[in-house]
Each structure stands twice: as C-alpha cells, then as structure tokens.
Amino acid sequence: MKRADSVIGFTLVELLMGITLTGVLVLGASVFFAAVYGSIQRTERIASAEMTLMQTGHWMLRALADGGLGAHQLYPEFETPGCFLVGESGVRLRAGALQWRPSGRDCQGSGWLTLHDPGVLYVETMDWRSPMLCFTGRASSRQEPLFEWCSPWPYPISGP
C-alpha cells in the first residue's frame, strides 16, 4: 500500500499560482507588443507621408520640365497665396492637398487634379524661397511632426 505523502504532482494552490503568474506574463507581453506595434505603425505613416511629399514635389518639377517651357515664362507667378502658375501650368494648395493644372491660367477655377490623398499627407504650406520651392506637411494627424521638402527651381530665374 502506498502512503498519501508520496504522491507525485502539484497541489491545487500551486496550480492556481502558476496559472495566475502565466496570465500576468501574457497580459504584460500583449500590452508591450501592442505598444511596439503602434509605434511601428506611426513611424511607417510618417515615412509614407514624407515619401509622398518628396515624390509629389519631384513629379511636379519634372512635369514642368517635360512641359516644354522654353518659350514660356520660367519664373513662378504667385496669383494668390498657395497657388502659382508657370507658363500654362499651375500648382495650388487646397484643403491640405496639392493640386495640379496642366493648362489654364486661373487659380480659382475648376479642372484641377489632386496629386495625393490628404488622408495620408496633409500639406500645410507651399513657399517660394527664391530660388527654392518648399512644401511643409505632416502625416494625416495633427499630432504628427511637421517635415519639409525643398528643391531648387530647375530653370534660370529671370523674374523678381
């Protein structure tokens, strides 16, 4: 006959303590990984917005260069704040989005094409700092940091 004190295994109290400790560890790990995942998503959102601003700016300058502006005025005319015209093309800032007009000389009219999703990139300002064209933007949330993209004007400057 076996004695009762020689039984191998865990008591109920030991099992409950082990399950409780495991639960606390799993909960802590899930909170930690959720915070890390949120930080990674925020960083990716900011990087995506910066890349969108850079690509849009380079595309815009390339489109002006490919437009054959040799016979046209090569200096941007600022008709209104947030809108400039070069030759027959134009760029304006409206509701946080850069808009492009391949032809036409009116900053207020229709026919403008939105170049990016303002939900990904919200452009705050468009500045001319002779001879640089600069844009300031942020990822869609107002809490995100501002970033700036500037590029030299690709043509000889003959204007003011």
Image: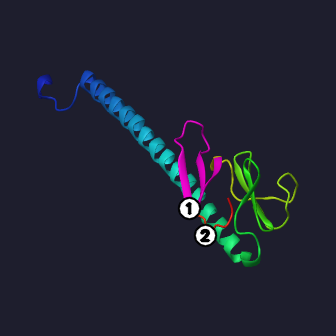
Q: Can I make out residue 67 in this image? A: no
CB contact under 8 Å: marks 2 and 1: yes
Assess whether residue 20 is covered by the magenta stretch: no
Image check: 77 left or right of 11?
right
Instruction: Choose between 61 and 10: the one closer to the eye.
Output: 61
Is 149 covered by the magenta stretch? yes
The image quadrant that residue 34 belongs to is: top left
Q: Nearer the viewer, residue 64 or 49?
A: 64
Measured as percent of width and height from the top left, residue 83 is found at 75, 53
For disc 2, the marked residue is 154
The majority secondary structure of the magenta stretch comes to strand
**Which quadrant holds the N terminus?**
top left
Question: Residue 111 occupies which quadrant of the picture?
Answer: bottom right
Please give the name of the residue rendered at 70% of the width and 69% of the height, measured from the top-left corner.
74
Q: Residue at x 62, y 50 (%)?
A: 121
SS type, badge 2: loop
Q: CA distance from mark 2 to mark 1?
A: 8 Å
Quadrant of the drawing holding the C terminus: bottom right
> Where is residue 68 shown, x and y percent of the image?
73, 78
**Relative to 78, 19 lies left or right:** left
Horizontally, residue 66 falls left or right of residue 41, namely right
37 vs 76, left or right, is left
Amino acid identity at mark 1: Ser
Residue 49 spot, x, y in % from top left: 57, 52
Q: Which residue is mark 1?
A: 151
Write down the region rendered in magenta: 125-150
Q: Which mark is residue 128?
A: none
Q: Amino acid at mark 2?
A: Pro
